[in-house]
Image (cartoon, rainbow, N blue to C red):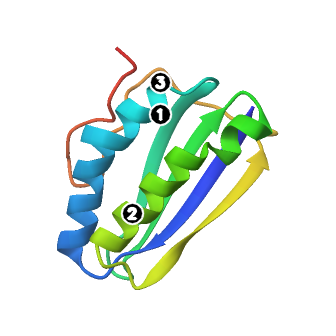
Amino acid sequence: MFARIVTFQRSSSSSTDEAIRVAREQVIPMARQQPGYRGVCVLTDRASGKQLGISFWETAEQARGSAGYNAARDRTSQELADTAPPVTEVFEVELAEQTEAPFRSSAGAVPLTSGA
């Protein structure tokens, strides 16, 4: 399994919230249609505006993404007025564990979406 980690530098708290909405409504449904997609999580440091999107894929090639997927990432970053272009890296997952309990944000927000 491979992880695609995209680092964003959001310009404000409202752009961070908008990015999460776009991820739920557009990015995740698009990713679900891609071969090899296995899931995603988003990490946010609201104090600094830094946000990481970590998606999981069967192969490194799938993790690098299609041209359309990368274009959508760049377009969304521009629309949200990010303070820097997104940076994408791909890593092989060497170790992963997840409990059966659903993830929830520390703020008590809606749990991560399921593949259903």
The correct choice, above or below, for 115 with respect to 25 in the image is above
What residue type is disc 2 on? Arg
Identity of the residue drawn at 22% across and 74% down: 13
Residue 24 in the image, given as x and y percentages of width and height:
28, 41
Q: Nearer the viewer, mark 2 or mark 1?
A: 2
Q: CA distance from mark 3 to mark 2?
A: 19 Å
Q: Which mark is residue 21?
A: none
Q: Secondary structure at mark 3?
A: loop
Identity of the residue drawn at 51% across and 46% down: 69
Q: Which residue is mark 1?
A: 31
Q: Which residue is mark 2?
A: 75
In this orientation, does residue 95 appear?
A: no
Q: Which residue is mark 3?
A: 33
Within-10-Å neighbours for mark 2: few <14, some 14–19, many 20+ = few
| Side of 36 where 111 appears, left or right | left
What residue type is disc 3 on? Gln
The quadrant of the picture occupied by the N terminus is top right
| Side of 27 where 14 appears, left or right | left
